Image (cartoon, grey):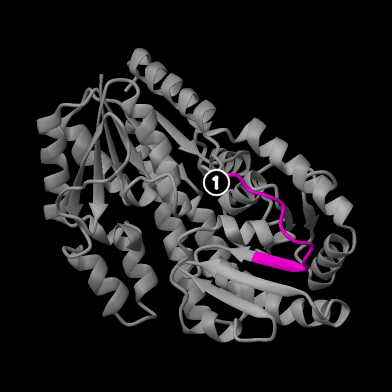
């Protein structure tokens, strides 16, 4: 069996959530025979050190050969005209890497490879489906959406509306419409769509009337060397991609609306903020008292070891939070909003400190966690058991192999 997997970032088991998710699909494909991973991004030629046994990896440079029309729409058209122009063009701005030369090169490589099945990761790569099916009409396609990009952009639009930013709201409304239309348009040629959680699946089924949606949960990251109990400190930890908009918003909201009051009650409380690509805004908001910024950490294990809890103060966004699964792997308690816990089916009284998206309730959750270490440890232990039971990587990879086999056997598309 030959499976071709097209993704926007090199699959790895550590790093950001998208890379870890694509590595599960790559592992599943490689375990069935041969796998060709096509990474469309800032890559040219073969890509080494991928760590996926049984898979070969090739890169296609999409970032330096952008789609001209999308570049003009997003960068040069008058801002008030951009939403309508984007809808007319019908492709999300994230698909800017799929210029005609990049698309043709991708199709040519797969035609040469002659796969039995194709996996396409993320909705913004769905414009590849039409040309691929035109060239390889009998090869079934599985599309891993992971998140609901339409709902994600609508959450951005709601935030922009709350701050009276009409131009930004209209842009994200257009992005949401285009993302939905991409999925609807590809549905006739896709044998199965996959996503990371029940919330996303229900939204796609209800809003877009998709029938062939399967939940493939995110796996907890492979832990670094086994954790040991840390010292009895009052240290909280924020981990995440520090260039991701919902993370920046949540961090700012926590530091301005919760942290000052928390320090009044716990003057010795500390916060470590760790993640990739922190910009000037993040560096500024992390310059306060008892706050340490760890940019682009090589290892997160020491950070979890010394933390009482991981704080996930998200107010908007979509999808399930790998950072909560990661905290569970390390036996670290979690304090989060209902939005942060969305899609994970956590018990708010058993697995984590889950509260409404309200500064008063988030403060109360932090106080409860720091005040009662036995309760914190009990919830951390329960979360660790939950993660190991429901987000085990090998189990999810085996389920993916079953899905691939079933798709091939059905012969529906």
Give the residue displayed 69% in from the left and 51% down from the top. 341
Q: Quadrant of the C terminus?
A: top left
Residue 63, placed above or below residue 148: below
Tell me what residue is drawn at x 81 percent, y 50 percent.
Answer: 377
- Percent x, y of residue 112: 9, 32
On the image, which quarter does residue 267 sit in?
Answer: bottom right
Query: Where is mark 1, residue-wise?
Result: 225
* For residue 226, side relative to residue 56 (left or right): right
The quarter of the picture where residue 350 lies is top right
> Compared with residue 279, is residue 340 higher up or lower down, i.e. above or below?
above
Residue 200's spot in the image, x, y percent? 57, 44
Q: Could you say which is closer to the camera, residue 205 or residue 124?
A: 124
240 inside magenta stretch: no
Horizontal side of residue 252 vs 404, given as left or right: right
* Image x and y of residue 47, in percent: 20, 47
Q: Which stretch appears magenta?
A: 224-237
Does residue 106 show up? yes
In the image, what residue occupies the spot 27% across and 61% down? 96
Res 157 seen here = no
Residue under the point 59% across and 51% down: 321
């Amino acid at each position: 069996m030959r499976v071709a997997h097209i993704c926007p970032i090199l699959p790895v088991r550590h790093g950001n959530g998208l890379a870890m998710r694509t590595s599960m699909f790559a592992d599943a494909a490689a375990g069935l025979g041969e796998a060709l991973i096509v990474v469309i991004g800032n890559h040219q030629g073969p890509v080494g050190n991928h760590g996926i046994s049984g898979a070969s990896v090739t890169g296609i440079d999409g970032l330096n050969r952008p789609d001209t029309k999308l570049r003009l729409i997003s960068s040069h058209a008058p801002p008030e005209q951009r939403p309508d122009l984007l809808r007319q063009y019908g492709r999300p701005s994230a698909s800017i890497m799929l210029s005609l030369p990049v698309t043709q090169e991708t199709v040519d490589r797969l035609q040469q490879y002659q796969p039995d099945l194709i996996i396409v990761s993320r909705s913004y790569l769905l414009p590849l489906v039409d040309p691929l099916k035109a060239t390889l009409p009998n090869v079934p396609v599985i599309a891993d959406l992971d998140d609901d990009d339409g709902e994600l952009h609508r959450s951005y639009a709601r935030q922009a509306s709350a701050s009276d930013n009409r131009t930004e709201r209209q842009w994200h409304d257009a992005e949401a419409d285009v993302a939905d239309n991409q999925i609807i348009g590809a549905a006739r040629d896709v044998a199965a769509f996959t996503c990371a959680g029940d919330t996303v699946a229900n939204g796609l089924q209800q809003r877009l009337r998709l029938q062939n949606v399967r939940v493939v949960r995110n796996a907890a990251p492979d832990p670094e060397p086994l954790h040991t109990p840390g010292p009895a400190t009052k240290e909280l930890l924020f981990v995440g991609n520090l260039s991701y908009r919902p993370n920046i918003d949540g961090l700012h909201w926590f530091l301005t609306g919760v942290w000052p009051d928390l320090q009044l009650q716990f003057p010795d409380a500390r916060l470590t903020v760790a993640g990739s690509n922190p910009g000037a805004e993040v560096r500024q908001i992390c310059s306060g008292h008892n706050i340490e910024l760890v940019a682009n950490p090589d290892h997160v294990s020491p950070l979890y070891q010394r933390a009482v809890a991981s704080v996930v103060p998200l107010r908007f966004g979509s999808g399930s939070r790998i950072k909560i699964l990661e905290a569970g792997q390390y036996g670290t308690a979690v304090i989060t909003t209902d939005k942060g816990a969305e899609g994970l089916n956590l018990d708010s009284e058993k697995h984590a400190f889950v509260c409404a998206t309200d500064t008063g309730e988030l403060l109360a959750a932090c106080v409860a966690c720091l005040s009662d270490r036995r309760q914190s440890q009990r919830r951390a232990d329960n979360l660790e058991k939950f993660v190991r039971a429901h987000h085990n990587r090998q189990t999810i990879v085996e389920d993916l192999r079953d899905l691939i086999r079933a798709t091939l056997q059905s012969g529906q598309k």
